[in-house]
Image (cartoon, rainbow, N blue to C red):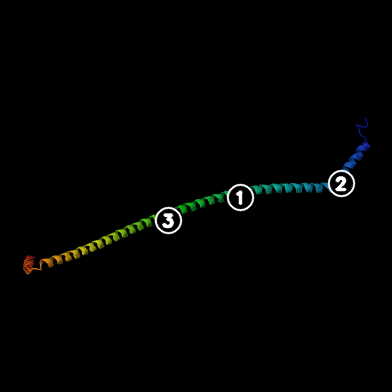
Amino acid sequence: MELITPGLGLIFWMTLAFLFLVFVLGKFAWKPILQMLKERETSIHEALNAANQAREEMKQLKFSNEQLLQEAKNERDALLNEARKVRDRLLEEARIKAGEEASRIVEAAKASINNEKMAAMTELKNQIAESSLTLAKFILKRELTDPRKQEEYVQELIKEIKFN
């Protein structure tokens, strides 16, 4: 039973060794250990705060990136719409210019055709007149070789002049 119940001296020396150990640990070990635990707790807390802050910054960056992406899409759409408008305007202007040019060419062609027609008609009239004069000249030479026929022709002309 001696092993189960300790003696009074053993309890005294164990208590004294325990108190000495508590005093030495309190004097030299507890403060640095508690300080290290406090520093560890602070560093963990700061790391958690930094992680939360980084998470918030990532959310902000993600939101900012999404916003920039949306702005870029909107700008791209605006540029495409502007390009379509410019293309349509240029096509319309080209169509109008082509129509005007075609009308001008048609008008010029009509005027040219009309001028050529008038020139041809004038030339034809001149040739007909020349042919008529030549023919009349031959007829008059033949008819008026006889003096009696000349006298009859002069009398006929005088009668016509009096009626006009």
- Assign the C terminus to one quadrant of the image: bottom left
Q: Amino acid at mark 2?
A: Val
Question: For this rendering, which residue is in front, 50 or 123?
Answer: 123
At x 66%, y 49%, the residue is: 54
Question: For this rendering, which residue is in front, 43 or 164?
Answer: 164
Question: For this rendering, which residue is in front, 155 or 1?
Answer: 155
Which residue is denoted by mark 3 in the rendering?
A: 90
Question: For this rendering, which residue is in front, 93 or 56?
Answer: 93
Q: Callout 3: 10 Å neighbours few (<14), some, many (20+)?
A: few
Which residue is denoted by mark 2 in the rendering?
A: 24
Q: Amino acid at mark 3?
A: Leu
Nearer-N-terminus badge (1/2): 2
Q: Secondary structure at mark 2?
A: helix
Q: Callout 2: 10 Å neighbours few (<14), some, many (20+)?
A: few
Left or right: residue 112 versus residue 131 is right
Q: CA distance from mark 2 to mark 3?
A: 95 Å
**Viewer-side label of 3, 1:** 3
Left or right: residue 27 versus residue 133 is right
**Viewer-side label of 2, 3:** 3
Which residue is denoted by mark 1 in the rendering?
A: 61
- Assign the N terminus to one quadrant of the image: top right
Q: Picture coordinates of residue 100 (x, y %)?
A: 35, 57
| Above or below, 52 relative to 136 | above
